[in-house]
Amino acid sequence: MKRILAVIIAGFALFAQSYAQDIEVTAQFYNKTMYYPSSAEDNPVYVHVTVANKGPETLRFKLADDRMFSMDFKVLTVKNKELPATDKLIRKRTMQQTIYFREISLETGEEYSFTENLKDFVQIDDPAVYYMEVTFYPELYKSRLSNAITSNRMTLEVRPSPNAAASSIIPVAPISTEILQPEAISPDKVVEQTIVARQRSLWDQYFLYMDLEEMLMRDPVRNRKYRSASAIERDKMRENYKADLQQSRIDGDIVAIPERFTIDKTVYTQTEGTVTSTQWFKYDNFYEKKRYTYHVRQRDGVWKIFDYTVENLGTE
């Protein structure tokens, strides 16, 4: 009996070793944005998973239609404590059901990819820095002892949930422009600080993270004049543009003062991104609600606003 058991264990070991040599599982964030400890639907953490055949022979594995039976996410705190699975994952894996799957065949060098929401698998309640990796089960998940392949490890930063109360207390000091320098902060913080600076009429802070040249050229007429102007004339045009903004003579939407706001979504690459904000403007008997989308660009490590759009969302 012991000999049979040893043979079975050895067989499983050889099987796992063969898979480990032939399969490479890699993970990367898909459509990366700012992550908060909110629901899977409101703020998903999409991860793009790729299974590649690195061996000399055809690779075959099973892939469940419900990916919860083909993979896991392992998320650890900086103290190496693993976050718990979601109720949804636990419920699915403990109930009696038929698991539907496909057999995938990959030739040498071929890959198969899919995208899953990490928050469907792991419960994230607190803002913090975490380390995460994907566990892939080539023969489906049966238990934690199922043969598995582990992906590369990634860093997941979960920020405190943005809200109007949090935004209103962002420190914005009335410092003079001679000593005020932009910092390498994230795109959402750039927008937050810009809005708060406008709420407090701190113009030096307000213009700190704004690409005035690009903003000025949003208008086709100003664009043509600016491009044909000399360097001295361009400096004067930028100063006039700032003065017009301060007096609300042009681009009224960008200098409008919201009573409150939220940062809803931030999406960015290494060089460009967008930050979406809902803002409420108070009138005598109602609030006007608008959605702002700020376009940001990174230069020399600093994010700046260079364009924006506004969508009216009605009144409240």
Image (tube, rainbow, N blue to C red):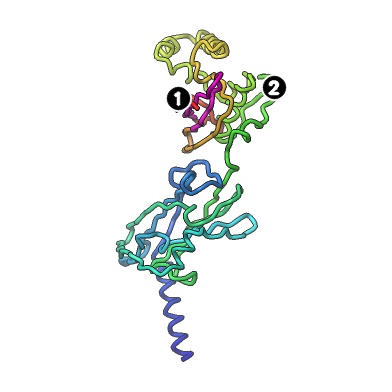
Q: Mark 1 points at which residue?
A: 310
In the image, 17 versus 47, the foreground residue is 47
Q: Is residue 265 above or below residue 104?
A: above
Q: Which element carries disc 1, helix, strand or loop?
A: strand
Q: Give the amino acid at mark 1.
A: Val
Locate residue 152, reporting x and y percent.
49, 57
Viewer-proximal residue among 65 and 188? 65
Label annotation for residue 175: 2
Disc 2 element: loop
Given residues 248 and 289, the one toward you in this image is 289
Q: Is residue 225 or residue 219 the one in the foreground?
A: 219
Q: Residue 224 location, x and y as percent?
A: 40, 12
Residue at the farthest bottom position: 1
Magenta segment, which residues? 276-296
Q: Residue furthest front?
A: 285
163 lies above or below 98: above
Q: Is residue 294 left or right of residue 52?
A: right
Marks 2 and 1 sit apart, C-alpha to C-alpha, by 30 Å
User: Mark number for residue 212?
Assistant: none
What residue is drawn where x is 31% and y is 63%? 104
Q: Give the left or right position of residue 81, taking residue 266 as reference.
A: right
In this rendering, the label closer to the viewer, 2 or 1? 1
Q: Label 1: how many residues lie within 10 Å, few (<14), some (14-19) or many (20+)? A: some
Q: Where is residue 268 in the image (x, y as percent from the top left)?
A: 47, 37
Q: Which of marks 2 and 1 is nearer the N terminus?
A: 2
Q: Report which quarter residue 142 is drawn in.
A: bottom left
Amino acid beneath label 2 = Ile
Bin the neighbour count of mark 2 within 10 Å (Cα to Cα): few under 14, some 14-19, many 20 and up: few
Can residue 56 be spotted in the picture? Answer: no
Residue at 46 percent across and 38 percent down: it is: 269
